[in-house]
Image: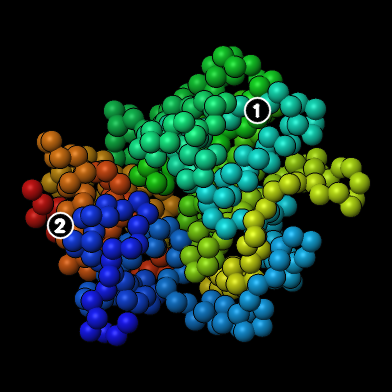
Amino acid sequence: MNATTPLDLSSYWMPFTHNRYFKQRPKLVASGRGSYLTLTDGRRVFDCLSGLWCTPMGHCAPQIVQAIQEQVAGLDYTPGFQLSHPGAFELATRIAELAPAPLNRVFFANSGSEAVDTALKIAIGYHRLRGEASRTRLIGRERGYHGVGLGGTSVGGISPNRKMFAPLMISNVDHLPHTHNLAHMQFTRGQPAWGAHLADELERIVALHDASTIAAVIVEPMQGSAGVIVPPKGYLQRLREICDRHGILLIFDEVITGFGRVGANFGSQRLGVTPDLICFAKAVTNGVVPFGGVIAKQSVYDTFMTGPAHAIELFHGYTYSGHPLACAAGNATLKLMQETGAIKRAAMLEPVLEHAMHSLREEPHVNDIRNFGLAAALELKPRDGQPGMRAMEMFERGLDAGILLRFTGDTLAVAPPFISTEDEIELMVARIRELLRELK
């Protein structure tokens, strides 16, 4: 197609997008460099959410681009079943070294959704191999997002993601209450002081179903897709204690919080709670190649390593597990993060983002501001009869103002790249302030 031929937008059914609205007002990205994207109409915008939480090192980082180019020129693909390549083992070792001990065994998938479904299957299989096949129930949390696989959708707690597909949901699932309460948490900086007791709802669920039926609890250390919902102080510790008491595995979905977003390798390290399984994706390859996986405790892995050595231990995996290009991107990304001190930089930028975002407290339409790590959310008061419209207008106007915002309902989320400067973060917030004052 040449430059004068109109682009046909009709065939592509876009994900999580109002397709009819978009195709009337298309917004197409032409290129990306560093912390900025350039649209096909020439507008250059600061990438306020690092893609979809996945490009902390910015766009088209030369080291990552070079690694992928060299990889595809030498080995483009190899089967991952009964065969592998050196880059996969190198990446698994890097990830295990970053993870909290004793999580040191890494299973590769291709996305956060696949990582979650993998973790749920590992949890069920683990209990079965230990002679506790009755442990089949999974516990998620309201407002939780764990991807769009059937397992992740079932344990997830975002209603619009679930209601159309109710007949396909896994039956043995229950949900903890979410931890967001404006009456006790409004305009909290970092972790709220109120809310640890909400973890005790797990004891009620255990009493209802009996611990012998429960395989695992899965939560996000910080809920990202629901709008940066930060765990109350002591909440995750209580979940860990209750799971230990009843022999239940604890899974952390760190697809967003993994690899530096909260100023540590993983959210579990920042928050001082070690789960049994960690799901990861997004930032591990800087979003350049789809990738994800699960990090398991040594003891969980060892439970599967029984029977004859020539037998397959886990009947699970994907055609593209450990894909050479993805592993090249992952190794280059994690090496670049280490060499540049990117995670320490994210921690350094956290108070800059916190101060700037909370300076919006008295601006028009602001209902709440939350922050944790290099992430924050601005919750707007909904417009009467038009929920979500204020945030959508902020998104649209933001493109003209040079910022690409992410909105869910009436909540705007920001999670700038680790390579951002203090001036860029302050300018992003200054432009948000201008848009709020113009908004009706």
Q: Quadrant of residue 84?
A: bottom right
Residue 50, labelled with which disc?
none
Q: Amino acid at mark 1?
A: Thr
Determine which residue is flagged by label 2: 435
The reply to whether residue 93 is visible in this rendering is no
Q: Amino acid at mark 2?
A: Leu
- Residue at figure coordinates x 47%, y 45% from the top left: 148
- Sequence-first tag of 2 and 1: 1
The answer to whether 434 is drawn above or below residue 149 in the figure is: below
- Pointer 1: residues within 10 angstroms few (<14), some, or many (20+)? many
Q: Is residue 384 left or right of residue 357?
A: left
Q: Quadrant of residue 1?
A: bottom left
- Residue at figure coordinates x 64%, y 25% from the top left: 214
The answer to whether 162 is drawn above or below residue 320 in the figure is: above
- Pointer 2: residues within 10 angstroms few (<14), some, or many (20+)? some
The answer to whether 171 is drawn above or below residue 371 in the figure is: above
Q: Residue furthest right?
A: 308
- Residue at figure coordinates x 59%, y 17% from the top left: 209
Q: Nearer the viewer, residue 425 or 378?
A: 378
Q: Secondary structure at mark 1?
A: loop
Residue 136, labelled with which disc?
1
The reply to whether residue 285 is visible in this rendering is yes
Q: Residue furthest top?
A: 208
Q: CA distance from mark 2 to mark 1?
A: 49 Å
The image position of residue 412, as x and y in percent, is: 28, 50
